Amino acid sequence: MEIDRRRLLAGTGAAISLMAVDAAATPLGKARSGFLWGSSGASYQIEGGNVASDLWVLEHVKPTIFQTLSGDACDTFNRFEEDIALAAKLGFNCHRLSIEWSRVEPERGQVSAAGLAYYRRVLEACRKRGLAPVVTFSHFSVPRWVAASGGFTDPANVAAFARYCGRLTEAMGDLIHIAATFNEPNLATVVRWGGLSEKYRPYILAMQKAAAEATASPKWASPLVSGESQYAGILEAHAAAIESVRAAGGRFPVGITLAITADRPANGDATGMNRKNAEMVDRWIAAPGDFIGVQAYTGSLVGADANVAPGPGEELTQMGYAFMPEAAEGAVRLVAARTKKPIYITENGVATEDDSRRVAYIRGAVAGVERCLADGIDLRGYIHWSLLDNWEWMSGYGPKFGLVAVDRTSFKRTPKPSARVFGEIARRGGLG
Ligand code: BGC
C-alpha cells in the first residue's frame, strides 16, 4: 500500500473559565491573569502499551495504515512525573493531557480502580507543580469493546462514554481545570476537503475488516477512521457526557476541541471555502459546551470542492503541509466570528527537524495570539503541540513536533532550544 502521507495529512491540522486559574498556578508576569500557557500530549501517543485500545488492534492487523507500532511510545506511563516536572520547570502554567478510556474501563462495565487512581496521581502531579490540568476524555482512541460494537453508532457506547466521564468526574473532578470530551471529532471533514477520503477508503475498509475478523466482531468500527458516519453518535455522547459531569458534581468547564484549517479562497472565489468552514465547525460549535478548543497547524487555498495542494517553492513541514505560523490566529478568528464562547488554542505546532523553524513558528503564532487579544477576542490560552516528540499516528516516530526530544531507546528527554524560548514566552505572558 502506497500511502501519500504528505497529501493525507495536508490540511488536517491537525481546544468559561468558571474558575480562575489558581493564583499559585499562574506564574504570569504582565500576562492577562488566568491565560493558559502550556504544552500538550495525548495518552495513546506518549504513554506506551495501551493494549486495550482499539488502535492497538488496528496497528497489529494486516493490512494496517499505521506505518510503525506505537509500542512503548515515550514511556510516559512510567515517566509522567518527570514530564510534568519538566513542563513546570520550562515555565508553563497548564498541562494538556488525555485519559485513556481503555485503562479506566478495559472491558465494558469493568472499571479499573487502579486506572482511576493512576490518572488521579497524574493530575495531582500537575497540581503539585502548579500546572492547571487541561484534560481530554477521549483523544482519538477508545476501548476495543467500543469499536467492536460499532463505535458511536451503538447507543450503548454513547451511554458508556457519558458514564465514563461521570466516573472520571467523581474520581478526579476536583483536580480538573477544564475538560474536553472529544479531540477533533470533526477531523474527517477536514480530511475530506483535503481530497483524501476516497483515496484512503479502501485501505481503511481493509484494515477495519481485518480488525473485525481478528476480534470476531463483525460490527467493528474505530471512530478515528470511520469518518462522518460517527458524527451523530459523537454529538450525542458529547452532550450526554456534559450532563453526566454535572450530575457527578463537576464544576469545571467542559467543551470540545476542533481541527481547524486557516484557509484562503482559490481564484478569489470564496464559495468553496465558506462551505468548508461551515461543514468543519458549525454543528460542533452549536453543540452544548462551555468553550471551543481550536487546534490549528496550517491552511491552504480552497477551491469549489477541495483544497488546492501547496504550490512549488512553498515551505512545507514534515507533514507535507504549508509552514504557517499564522494558522492559529486565522482559526481563532474563524471561530470567534461564529460564537461568543471562550476559545482556547489547545493545539498548535510544527513538525520539523530544524528547531530554529519551530522557534520562528512559535513566535509567529504568539504574535497572532496577541493580535487576537488586542482585538478583544475571548481567547484564554495557547497550548503548544507537543511537549514531547511522540508517536504521530500513521506517520509513526518520523515527524518531530516536540519541544523536547525523546531518545527512542533510553527514553531520555532533552529539551530543545524552542522549549526554552516558549518557556520564556510563557513566563513573560507574551513576546514581551
Ligand atoms: C491531533 C494530535 C496530532 C497533531 C499533529 C492533531 O490533529 O490532535 O494527536 O499529533 O494534530 O498532527
Image (cartoon, grey):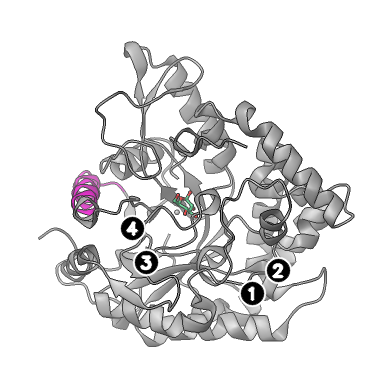
269 left or right of 122? Answer: left
Q: In this rendering, is residue 344 above or below 105?
A: above
Q: Amino acid at mark 2?
A: Tyr
Q: How far across and how far down the image is residue 138, in percent?
A: 61, 60
Q: In this rendering, is residue 29 above or below 69?
A: below
Image quadrant occupied by the C terminus: bottom left
Q: Pointer 2 and pointer 4: residues touching (CB < 8 Å)?
A: no
**What is the CA distance from the residue labelled 1 to the residue labelled 4?**
24 Å
175 left or right of 301? Answer: right
Q: Amino acid at mark 1?
A: Leu
Q: How far across and how far down the image is residue 342, in percent?
A: 40, 52
Circle 4 residue: 380
* In this rendering, the label closer to the viewer, 2 or 4: 2
125 left or right of 160? Answer: left
Q: Nearer the viewer, residue 170 or 198?
A: 198
Q: Amino acid at mark 3?
A: Leu
Circle 2 residue: 164
Circle 3 residue: 387
* In this rendering, the label closer to the viewer, 1 or 3: 3
Q: Amino acid at mark 4?
A: Arg
* Total numbered badges shown on the rendered structure: 4
Q: Is residue 110 visible?
A: yes
- Find residue 168 and name its label: 1
Image quadrant assignment for residue 303:
top left
Earlier residue among tags 4 and 3: 4
Image quadrant assignment for residue 59:
bottom right
